Image (cartoon, rainbow, N blue to C red):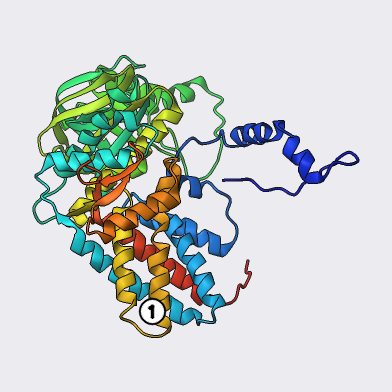
Amino acid sequence: MAAVASTAVAAGPGASISDSAFNDKGKPTEVRLSNMNAAKVLITNDGATVLQHMAVLHPAARMLVELSKAQDIEAGDGTTSVVVLAGSLLSQAEKLLSQGIHPTTIAQSFQGAAAKAVEFLEQMSVPIDLNDKETLIRIAATSLNSKIVSQYSPILAPIAVEAVTRLVDPTSSNVDLRDIRIVKKVGGTIEDTTLVEGVALNQPVVSSAGGPTRMDKAKIGLIQFQLSSPKPDMDNQIVVNDYRQMDKILKEERQYILNLCKKIKKTGCNVLLIQKSILRDAVTDLSLHFLAKLKIMVIKDIERDEIQFISKSTGAKPVADIEQFTEDKLGEAALVEEADVGGARVVEITGVKHPGKTVSIVCTGANSLVLEESERSLHDALCAVRCLVKKRALIAGGGAPEIHVSRLLTQYAQTLKGKEAYCYQAFADALEIIPTTLAENAGLNPIAIVTELRNKHALGDANAGINVKKGIVSNITAEQVVQPLLVTTSAVELAAETVSLLLRCDDLVMVR
């Protein structure tokens, strides 16, 4: 990728501008260093993340950012491929437009070609059984191979597979990744990342008042009201001149908070999760003191969006009023404790009596940058396994399916007549951008590699793909480089849809 800027170059007499630019050996280094300094904000090779952080203003360009996001939601992988493919389709569309073919004809043909491509992909796919854990781990590992944390794929891939398969039953057609909670903690290394048999919480146990930090046979309460003195709706001030009145106010406050704490203890609750409050203090030093005396373990600052997950995981029902706080609202677990995971402190709730279908993963890393990238990579691995729940089939990787479909589409285009045949052929040519880009990224000669790839496919080897590690074209399934069918079908469909939409736009109206 090159950053282009217009510059004026001053050259001495007798030297051309191009000569002086050519002789300036320091400039490339300077530009690279400048680019590196400018890009030190975020370190990632995740396509969707890069696009999301770009300040893209043009509405058509924004559509490509949204396209990448849509692929991330649908398949979770192939976020870069879908944008590269859309760009290639736009280049082909430009050629077709210059030949006088109407945009609507191109758009309709591209969508027809995409449907045909998906049909060919399904024909070459191999069905998979979700009980075959070894294959699932290979899929997750393949999605991690292109990541910065690829050397940790033997640790992260089995975690991703275990997390998704725990949420699946034989009739499942999807998995909600919101039921998989990733708790990020700076400390240790990525190798310390673990799957928790229960629930992991980001918030620490409040131990400042001397309350317990470990609780066996836990009865968990989840409250959304505050353990602090009530405040009126309006801002006001009370001026107290008499010490006896002041003492009375303090006694009333103590009594009010003590009554709340006693009512909580009366239900049998010994672990209290308190939602973060924006109105007033969720807990005060006084309420923490009373709860510590009553041997109740306290975890505060539970976020609003975590309530549903915790409730589903532990069976504890969220309560908004002390009068509604009864024993039947409590969740039960064998143990709640603050555990040490790779030097980081994490609260773990294990041995839940009536566990919901949820999973917690504690993700660790040496610093926040590594941690963020590890989480993104783990998310992609989870998505790769989820793809197999949605569409239980696999295809080869390494550019093999794109070349195979491109060849079949070319053959199909020859059976068509008129402008449609040109459009289908253009779609087939556009698909070759994926193996071409893959070859370039692997430092290979793209023309030689793609030509050899076409040759092998023409001779009937449908699984011939680019072996990035060896730098050759080989049988890619023998190298265990496979990917979920959904990743490729989704990329083809979404790219074709976006390009068709862009072709149908013929005016740009700027509105506020």
Question: Residue drawn 26% across and 18% down?
Answer: 213
Q: For the point 44% across and 52% down, which residue is it? A: 447
Q: Is residue 147 left or right of residue 326?
A: right
Above or below, comparing residue 39 to residue 350 in the picture: below
User: The disc labelled 1 sits on which kind of residue?
Assistant: Ala
- Other-residue count near label 1 (Cα within 10 Å), few / some / many at <14 / 14–19 / ≥20: some
Q: Secondary structure at mark 1?
A: helix
Task: From the viewer's perspective, tell me whether residue 37 is left or right of residue 394.
Answer: right
Quadrant of the drawing holding the N terminus: top right
Give coordinates of residue 512: x percent, y percent. 63, 66
Residue at the image point whose x is 71% and y is 48% from the top: 5
As displayed, is residue 214 above or below residue 356? above
Q: Look at mark 1 in the image and give the residue it sits on.
A: 421
Residue in view at x 49 percent, y 66 percent = 90
Inspect this view and state whether residue 454 appears: yes
Above or below residue 239? Residue 442 is below
Residue 492 x %, y %: 35, 62
Q: Nearer the viewer, residue 213 or 66?
A: 66
> Residue 239 placed where, x, y %?
57, 30
Image mark count: 1
